[in-house]
Image (cartoon, rainbow, N blue to C red):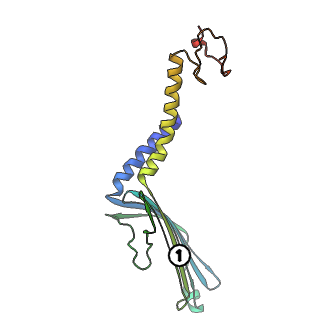
Amino acid sequence: MLLRLLSLLLCLMTAALWAWSYRSGDGIVQDRETLSDSTFHYRQLAAYSMRGGVMFNHGYFQRVLSPQAVAARQIRPASLGFWHIDRPRYPSGTPGEIPLQPLNWLGFHFGTNHGRDPATATYSSSLSIVAPFWFLTLALVTPTVFVSWRRHLRRRARSRNRCVGCGYDLRGSLGRCPECGTEVPAEARV
């Protein structure tokens, strides 16, 4: 019962987010900066809700710094933040953004972007995966439908005096189903 209720609640929340995602883009972002020797590293993990889907993004940036830049660099601590934009759009492929055209099937998107610039000693890469809300809603409602259907079949079998395991007619059977060995409930015994 608790699983069905939780699954239904998550399904309704996902459906509400689906409708909201066309009006507003929201997300949660975790980023971290590190400095090892003379190399600056920046990593970002993010999940955004926008335009009918959820985009999961991983980004990485690396740059070799001069000794003066290393001395002046203030490393921010790891942070967790929220992101919001009105009328969201997926990145269009402008420099530095993630092109999401390679795979676009039923609302699923996948995109990657990486490159190295020897002149500035930088390297960047990013990976994005978009899952449509219809898929997430379907995945969350499936346990509820499955459990409800099984319960319906069991109730129907009991009401027709049949075994809940195999459907065998239990009239005249005592204790166990003669076909599959499932124990017969006391109210089903005749």
Q: Amino acid at mark 1?
A: Ser
Q: Give the answer, above or below, for where 149 lies relative to 138.
A: above
Identify the secondary structure beneath mark 1. strand
Q: Give the answer, above or below, for where 178 lies relative to 104.
A: above
Q: Few, some or many C-alpha atoms within 10 Å of disc 1 (few <14, some 14-19, many ≥20)?
A: some
Q: Residue at x 49, y 37 (%)?
A: 144
Residue that mark 1 sits on: 125
Task: State which quadrant residue 154 falls in.
Answer: top right
Task: State which quadrant residue 173 falls in.
Answer: top right
Query: In the rendering, at what x and y percent does residue 39 appear?
Result: 61, 83
Query: In the rendering, at what x and y percent does residue 31 appear?
Result: 52, 69
Query: In the rendering, at what x and y percent does residue 186 appear?
Result: 61, 13
Q: How many marks?
A: 1
Query: In the rendering, at what x and y percent does residue 163 appear?
Result: 59, 19
Q: Give the answer, above or below, for where 104 lies relative to 43.
A: above
Camera-side residue of 8 and 137:
137
Camera-side residue of 180 and 131:
180
Q: Residue at x 51, y 36 (%)?
A: 146
Left or right position of 19 against 76: left
Q: Residue at x 46, y 45 (%)?
A: 10
Camera-side residue of 135 and 57:
135
Q: Residue at x 49, y 27 (%)?
A: 152
Camera-side residue of 99 and 28:
99
Considering the image in quadrants, where does the C terminus appear? top right
